[in-house]
Amino acid sequence: MADEAKAKGNAAFSSGDFDSAVNHFTEAINLAPTNHVLFSNRSAAHASLHHYDEALSDAKKTVELKPDWGKGYSRLGAAHLGLNQFDEAVEAYSKGLEIDPSNEGLKSGLADAKASASRSRASAPNPFGDAFQGPEMWSKLTADPSTRGFLKQPDFVNMMQEIQRNPSNLNLYLKDQRVMQALGVLLNVQIRSQQAGDDMEIGEEEMAVPSRKEPEVEKKRKPEPVPEPEPEFKEEKEKKEKKLKAQKEKELGNAAYKKKDFETAIQHYSTAMEIDDEDISYITNRAAVHLEMGKFDECIKDCDKAVERGRELRSDYKMVAKALTRKGTALGKMAKVSKDYEPVIETYQKALTEHRNPETLKRLNEAERAKKELEQQEYYDPNIGDEEREKGNYFFKEQKYPEAVRHYTEAIKRNPKDPRAYSNRAACYTKLTAMPEGLKDAEKCIELDPTFSKGYSRKGAVQFFMKEYENAMETYQQGLKHDPNNQELLDGVRRCVQQINKANRGDLTPEELKERQAKGMQDPEIQNILTDPVMRQVLSDLQENPAAAHKHMQNPMIMNKIQKLISSGIVQMK
């Protein structure tokens, strides 16, 4: 139940439904209150909702339950960072790196925390800084209809986070109407929204109660002077022009890529990179072209460059994750042996720590499956398999069955298509009374070679020991179709007939009868017979109407079902 709720929470988190994710993780925690992963996941969901107090509480619980788990400290650091507790965030990330020094998420988080702490100490205080502190900011913005929609816009959320981390950054975003609207909501004042080019101001008349409208009278008014637009700084203007120029190059590259004109696409993406080096999407797009062209080394170089530059720019985690996923795909294309898949799997895992994308998770599973298949192929050696099987035979004769199982298992790994190894291991499991394992091996043996009589002999023996005499009889008879003179199969049939006749004669002890009836009632076929209205009438006639019973006995199908009930001890003939 806890795993099911956890899976639902992960799915909701991946789709961006963080409220549902919190609910599902809470349900899972109620069922498994000592599972540290559940608290970690719920902490991440709370942080995504900007509920940093709750995220901090869950992160502390994660560390308490699993103090040697690096991700717990990553959650703790993220929560402190969201609450502008930079020194505590640095301490949490540093402690996590002591436990897991190679964790990229902890390294990135520590860099962010140190940078935020430095900015916080170096910056002069902003008079409006207090308005942006704490989780109350997000609550106010969510509650107000005029700013609620802004929270769905990633660039606005990033600006608010930057201002939270360093209130002096407010001066950088004052020209954004959304930021001014948010400031008005946080200060509980109305700020007039002007058209482009107008200044924004907070006037007393905006806060006054509006007066009643007078009847409209046409009045001649002097035309209001058109305000002059504010002069843009030269650097900002140049930067804006560069970005527009780079975006045009990117669009040309995208168009060439769709036409399979890869060389032209690379030229456009490279030009965009030269014009604007603060957008890693140009690099990841060029990497995609290299991947499509089969230039995997070039693709990997671009992906590494995108990740490195993305860390420097503190780019969106999704973009960094995309670069890592693309690198993993290129590495996978180059993989030839199982060992080559180790960096592929590691790269996909790093991508998932940045952003848990379902497509990346799918590729990770495919890489792990490919690695396992190659390992099996590389391990395949029929000669060593025969040697291990002979060693198993020796220990079997010495009645050292666990040792024999170990060697037979190694023989199967070396040659999974050898039915003899499965047959011999089934015999060992039978001796060890591990009947389900023995039955599974015997069935695999028959699947590999339907003409191998030993497989039927092993399966029949397991079924006989499980007191499934009807099933054992059927198995032995199937084997006799392939080897009619096999003495072991003939002896198996004879033993089954003896046990079935013993039930027919009513020679079972009370304990044997009770055990056989209990086993029979678990058999789906027996259950179907007993619930069949026709058979219920037949059973009633056997007790009360001898003439009708005699007629029923002449029907082979009914007689076969009655025989099965007798063999299972459900019906006794006197």
Image (cartoon, helix red, strand yellow):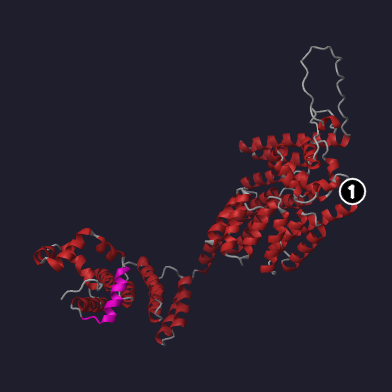
Report which residue position mark 1 lands on.
125
The residue that appears at 64% across and 61% down in the rendered structure is: 39
- Residue 172 covered by magenta stretch: no
Name which residue type carries label 1: Pro
- Residue 508 covered by magenta stretch: yes
Q: Is residue 349 above or below residue 255?
A: below
Residue 40 visible in the current orientation: yes
Q: Nearer the viewer, residue 350 or 391?
A: 350
Image location of residue 377, percent across then percent down: 51, 65
The residue that appears at 82% across and 53% down in the rendered structure is: 116
Q: Secondary structure at mark 1?
A: loop
**Crowding at mark 1 (Cα within 10 Å: few <14, some 14-19, many 20+):** few
Image location of residue 432, percent across then percent down: 41, 81
Q: Is residue 497 left or right of residue 185?
A: left
Residue 337 visible in the current orientation: no
The residue that appears at 72% across and 45% down in the rendered structure is: 283
Extent of the magenta region: 507-522
Q: Is residue 50 above or below residue 185?
A: below
Q: Is residue 160 left or right of residue 171?
A: left
Image location of residue 354, percent across then percent down: 68, 54
